[in-house]
Amino acid sequence: MGKYFGTDGFRGEANKNLTYEHAIKIGRYLGWYYGARLGKKAKIVIGKDTRRSSYMFEYALCTGLMASGADAYIMHVTTTPSVAYITHVDDFDCGIMISASHNPFYDNGIKLLNGNGEKMDEETILLVEDYIDGKVDIPIAERAEIGRTVDYVAGRNRYIGHLISMSKYSFKGVKVGLDCANGASWQIAKSVFDALGAKTFVMNAEPDGYNINTDCGSTHIEHLQKFVLDNGLNVGFAFDGDADRCLAVDEKGNVVTGDHTIYICGLYLKERGELVNNKVVTTVMSNFGLYKALDKVGIEYEKTKVGDKYVYENMVQTGNRIGGEQSGHTIFLQYETTGDGLLTALKLMEVMLAKEKPMSELAAPVVFYPQVLKNVRVKSKPEAQNDPDVQAAVARVAEELGDTGRILVRESGTEPVIRVMVEAESDEICEKYVDSVIDVIKTKGHMA
C-alpha cells in the first residue's frame, strides 16, 4: 500500500483526509500519464455513488483531467463494477470510481482502474502519489489540447444490458426483495430484475446525498430479513453503497453470506463440469464451516490475504473461476474483473431456478462455526506476531483444535493491532483459546 492509496483506493473523510485538491491532482496526473505523455488524447471514464461529496470530487477530477488534455466521460451515479466493465469493453485508457463503498456519507474514496477494468497496479499508483506530493512536474494543456467532458450515461445503459444478458432464465413469478442502500444501485437493480420478469420489491432506493448506507444495505441486513418475511418474498438481496458486494436473505429470513454464495455457485459450476481446477478462492477470514461443506462435496479451495484484490490476483494466476469474501465480494472471472453485487444476485437466482430449490435449501450445507475475534493493540505488530512464545501458543491451539476448528492471528493493515480469531464448536471454546494467546502477548510485554 502507498501513502494515500490502500488496497481499495484513496479513502478518507471528504475534504479532511481526502480533499478536492487531491482529486484535481489525481486527474491532472492520470490525464497526462495516459495522454500527453504518450502523444495522444486520453479517454478516461468516471462513475460516482450517491454521496453529496461525490459531485465535488467528480468535477474536481474532470478539471484535472481536462487541464492535462484528457477527455472525461461521465457515467454519473453508477456502480463500481459498471465502471470496471465499461472501462474494459469500451476501450478507455483507465477508469475512476468515486465511492467509499459501505462507509458513511461523510467519507469518500477514489478508486483507480486500469484499461482492463482491474484495480490499478502499485507502480502507477506510486507515480500518482509522487505527483500529489509535488515530487514531479507535468505540463498543462493549452489551446486546442485542453480536454472536454462527455456525458456517458450510455455506458450505464450498456452495463444494464450486459447484466440482463447474463440471466439464463426468466424470473417471472419470483418475488424478489432489493435493498439498494440508498446507493449506486438504486437506479439499476430494479431495472434489471423488472426486465427479467421478477415481481420486485425495493427498499432504500431514495438517496438524498446523506443516507447512503445509513441503517440499510448489506451492513444492516436485519432490515432486509424483516422485509422478506413481512412481504412473503422468495429471496432478497442487499447491496452496499457502490454495489460491489451482495448479501442475500432466504425465504425464511436467514442471511446468505459471501461464503454461502461461494459454496452454492461453486457446487453448481462443479455439477455442470465448469468449475475450473475444481477449486474456489477464499480469504483467510472465510468461516471454517465453509471449508467443511466444500470438503464434503469434493471441492478444493485456496486461501488468500483479506481483500478482493488478492482474490482476483489468485484467480488470474490460476484460472480459478469463482472466489470472494464472506462480506459479499464475489468475483465471477468468466464475466467480470471485480466483485459485482448485481451479478452475484443474478447468479444466485440462476442456481435457484436451475435446481428448482429454495435459497434456504441451497445454503443449508454451510453451517457456520462460532467465531470469536479480539483485537489487541500492540507496540510493534511484527515483534508481537513473530515472538517465538506467541507463535508457540498459536501452534498449541491449532494442534488442540485439530479438525474441529482453527485459529488465525494476523496484523491489521491500518492500525497498530493484532487480530486473534478462533472458530470452534462453541463460543466457550473460542473464548478460551483466544484469551490464551492474548495472555501470552500481554505477558511478553507487547501490548500498547
Image (cartoon, helix red, strand yellow):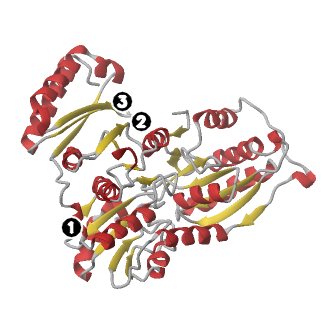
User: How far apart are labels 1 and 3 at the CA level?
Assistant: 40 Å
- Along the horizontal axis of the image, is 117 left or right of 402? right
Side (left or right) of 299 relative to 193: left
Task: Name the N-terminal-most of marks 1 and 3.
Answer: 1
Snapshot quadrant of residue 250: bottom left
Mark nearest the camera among 1 and 2 is: 1
Whether residues under marks 1 and 3 lie with C-beta atoms below 8 angstroms apart, the answer is: no
Mark 1 and mark 2 lie on one chain; the one further toward the N terminus is 1
- Give the image location of residue 51, x and y in percent: 52, 62
Badge 1 crowding class, 10 Å Cα cut-off, few under 14, some 14 to 19, many 20 or more, is: some
Asked if 432 appears above or below 325 in the picture, the reply is: above
* Above or below, comparing residue 339 to residue 391 in the picture: below
Task: Say which residue appears at 45% left-offset and 71% top-offset.
Answer: 167
- The residue identified by callout 1 is 360
The quarter of the picture where the C terminus appears is top left
Q: Amino acid at mark 2?
A: Thr
Q: Position of residue 70 (x, y in %)?
A: 78, 52
Q: Amino acid at mark 1?
A: Ser
Q: Which residue is mark 3?
A: 416
The residue positioned farthest toward the right in the image shown: 143
Quadrant in which residue 328 is drawn:
bottom left
